[in-house]
Amino acid sequence: MFIGHFAVAFAAKRAAPRTSLGVTFAAAQLVDMLWPIFLLLGWERVRIEPNANPFLTLDFTSYPWTHSLAMGVLWGAVFGGLYFAVTKYKRGAIVVALLVPSHWVLDAVVHQPDLPLYPGGAARIGLGLWSSPQAAIVVEAILFLAGIAAYATVTRARDRIGRYGLWALAAFLVLLYVASIVGPPPPNVTVLAWTALIGWPLTLWPWWVDRHRTNT
């Protein structure tokens, strides 16, 4: 799943109004932000397998340290703990901690059975919605629109940046999603990993937008 993760990050503002949108974006995408680093280090592996289904060009052969359920819970506890240590905002820390493993839950809906429960475990989870690209697109679009709506109803723009920056961010995420569907597969895993590192600087945009909005 792609923009579905951002949908959850947007919607989380309702549960933790004092938490920056940049932080919820980072939490919802944390395992995907760590994944390219682990690929470059050789700790996890993926194969590029182009075929007729645009959602299945990657064969996730091994990613237990980022995309297992147990590690998602652990990463969430670490992230939530660090957030609480800095902010002392308990509700925000709980929301942040839950957002991290929410990534595994949403991925389990769309992935083929390739998501481990814990490192070293043999079981692989995945309901395979990506096998029906049209259905996957509809589900993600509904989630994304619902997430944007939730964020827009609990915040209001302070200025033009807060107003237009939000919709520019939403449009950019949709364009990235479309590009991931219609674009060619990456030529190799190294290029894939370096490209995927965009997740790190991308968190600055929602942080910036959120600073120009206020809670209703």
Image: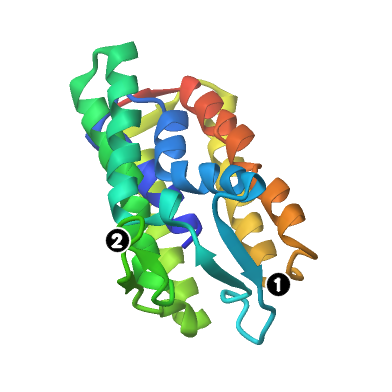
In the rendered image, the vertical position of residue 177 relative to residue 215, given as above or below: below
User: Mark 2–mark 1 contact, CB under 8 Å?
Assistant: no
| 17 and 101: which is toward the camera | 101
Q: Is residue 88 left or right of residue 142?
A: left
Quadrant assignment, res 139: bottom left
Task: List x then y, in percent, for residue 160.
Answer: 58, 26
Task: List x then y, in percent, for residue 135.
Answer: 44, 80
The amino acid at mark 1 is Val
Q: Residue at x 44, y 65 (%)?
A: 140
Q: Residue at x 32, y 30 (%)?
A: 78
Mark 1: give few (<14), some (14-19) or many (20+) Cα within 10 Å. few
Q: Is residue 208 left or right of residue 153?
A: right
Find disc 2 in the rendering and name its residue.
117
Q: Which mark is residue 75?
A: none
Task: List x then y, in percent, for residue 157.
Answer: 46, 27
Q: Quadrant of the C terminus?
A: top left
Gap between marks 2 and 1 measured at Cα: 31 Å
Task: List x then y, in percent, for residue 29.
Answer: 46, 45
The amino acid at mark 2 is Leu
| 10 and 97: which is toward the camera | 97
Quadrant assignment, res 200: top right
Find disc 1 in the rendering and name its residue.
182
Secondary element under disc 2, as helix, strand or loop, is loop
